[in-house]
Amino acid sequence: MSRYAFRAGAAAAGGFFTRPFNEPVPVQAASFLMPVGGYGSARVEQFRFHEIISFKAAYTQVIGTQHEQNGTIRYETLAAAVVEGLNILDIVTADRVVARLTSATPAEAKAAELEAVPFGSYFENLRIAGQPVRPTCHPHLFDAKSKSDILKNATPLFDADSTTTATPMTPSRDARLRFSIFQPLKDQVAGATIFPGCRIQIASFGDIFLGEFVVSAGHRQLTMIRVELHSPEEGEVAFGSVEGNGSGY
């Protein structure tokens, strides 16, 4: 008898520093789904890592269920992470960071490509160096649920992001795609340089990446904020990260 193995994970924050100290940032509010599905959640209040990172609250949840719709069994998965009151060195702040990834797979399509979308992922009052930044999700992303669909309709997505690791010219089923879920930023940040792919570089701080989305035929990973700190602090931290897939066996 065939079965379906669920897979989903979510974490609010984590990373590491190599300067001015060599120390990990413990993963916060991590949730992990068992292969049989079900529900998991975690919550952290008033987190502070030295005087570098803080947030008021963070929580995650993962859900894996199956149900019958119009005579067809469907396997549905959710991975979500929320960070409230985020502050990174008083340079990156946000009232809310929301990462959300959902998928639904019909039972007869267990061997097909995963169909998943990051609908409902957003920032509330995101500011960089005190200046508002308003990323907007790319509308084409919600029309292309599978990797093949993304490759067929990907030109607008890839044109917006020079950091993509695969292009429509190399539509390998096994290759991974990496791009931002957001359209090119229209906001200007004084003292920073904005690159394609929602990458913001600040010389005295580091590189900020917004809405990084990694896509393969059977897996998705979304990280809402990733920061590569260069100087005087050095390290890498991420916030609002979710991933998932599923497969029959």
Image (cartoon, rainbow, N blue to C red):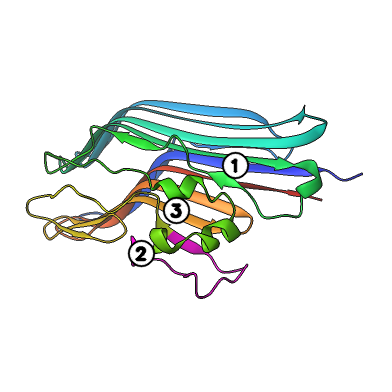
Q: In this view, does 248 lie to the left or right of 243?
A: right
Quadrant of the image occupied by residue 69: top right
Find residue 38 and report its image quarter.
top right
Question: Three-letter amino acid code at disc 2?
Answer: Asp
Could you say where residue 99 lies in the image, as x and y percent from the top left?
43, 38
Q: How far apart are labels 1 and 3 at the CA level? A: 15 Å
Q: Residue at x 60, y 42 (%)?
A: 8
**Residue 249 can be seen, yes or no:** yes
SS for tag 1? Answer: strand
Q: Left or right of 119: which side holds 132?
A: left
Span shown in magenta: 160-178
Residue 8 badge: 1
Q: How crowded is mark 3: few (under 14 residues within 10 Å), some or many (20 or more)?
A: many
Viewer-closest of 205 and 212: 212
Residue behind mark 2? 159
- Residue 127: image location, x then y, percent: 18, 39
Q: Can residue 22 be seen in this view?
A: no
Mark 2: which secondary structure? helix
Q: Name the residue under label 3.
A: 213
Of marks 2 and 1, which one's residue comes earlier in the chain?
1
